[in-house]
Amino acid sequence: MKKTLIVVIVLAAIVLVARPFFCNSDDKPTDKGADTKQQPLSISENTDVFKQSFTQLLNAYNTLKDALVASDTAKATAAALALRVAVDSLKLNEIKGDSTGDIKNTAQSFTSTIADLAQTLAAEKDLKGKRKEFEMIADNLWNLTRTVRYTSQKVYWQHCPMAFDNKGAYWMSYEREIKNPYFGNEMLTCGSVEDSLDYSK
């Protein structure tokens, strides 16, 4: 009886440890990775001017993402420079309902980091280097979007477990459909939707 119990426990442990890490297109949102992300500070009341400038920022990011999906080095460089302009033009002073200034200060930290990363990405010569910088841009932009509670567009948080030698990497997308910026056509649909933001509700 004891031997049988030991065998069952060992088999259960093996199943837990050996869970497969492979690409899939499971669109079921989960909380994976959410515990390391910056929590929204409070409900902000953003003006139309801010929303427009943030939309321009997300559009610039999306152009960069699409360039990496297409594995187009030249377009990725141009898109990174455009992203730098968009983040520098973000109207943080138009954030309302922030009596303590915490939202603006946190947002400024993220935008400063994104601007530096965009500049570095533009200077990288190869796609691998650009994709490493893009990973950090996506992470900071996701946290920024949560912090300011952007309400004009639903965005998805997606994950590829095989990026960077199976270390995994995240990215933001307007679309639920997976289009992997870390592998492009090599594994275009590798990944899953891990979370989403929709503050318009």
Image: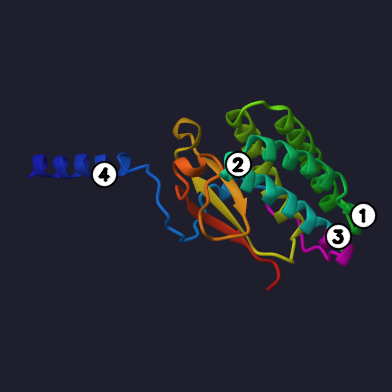
Q: Name the residue type under label 4.
A: Val
Labels 1, 4: front one: 1
Residue 196 higher or lower than 116, as above or below = below
Give the residue pinned by disc 4: 15
The answer to whether mark 1 and mark 4 are in CB contact below 8 A is no
Quick one: label 4 or label 3, which is nearer the N terminus?
A: 4
Q: Which residue is mark 3?
A: 50
| Left/right of residue 42 with respect to residue 27 in the rendered view | right
Picture mark count: 4
Q: Where residue 76 sits in the image (x, y, percent)? A: 68, 39
Three-letter amino acid code at disc 2? Leu
Q: CA distance from mark 4 to mark 3?
A: 49 Å
Residue projecting furthest to the right: 93
Q: Secondary structure at mark 2?
A: helix
User: How far is mark 1 from mark 4, CA to CA?
Assistant: 52 Å
> What is the basis of the colouring in this image?
rainbow
Residue at horizontal 65%, vertical 66%?
Answer: 198
- Tell which circle, 1 or 3, labels the residue nearer the N-terminal end: 3
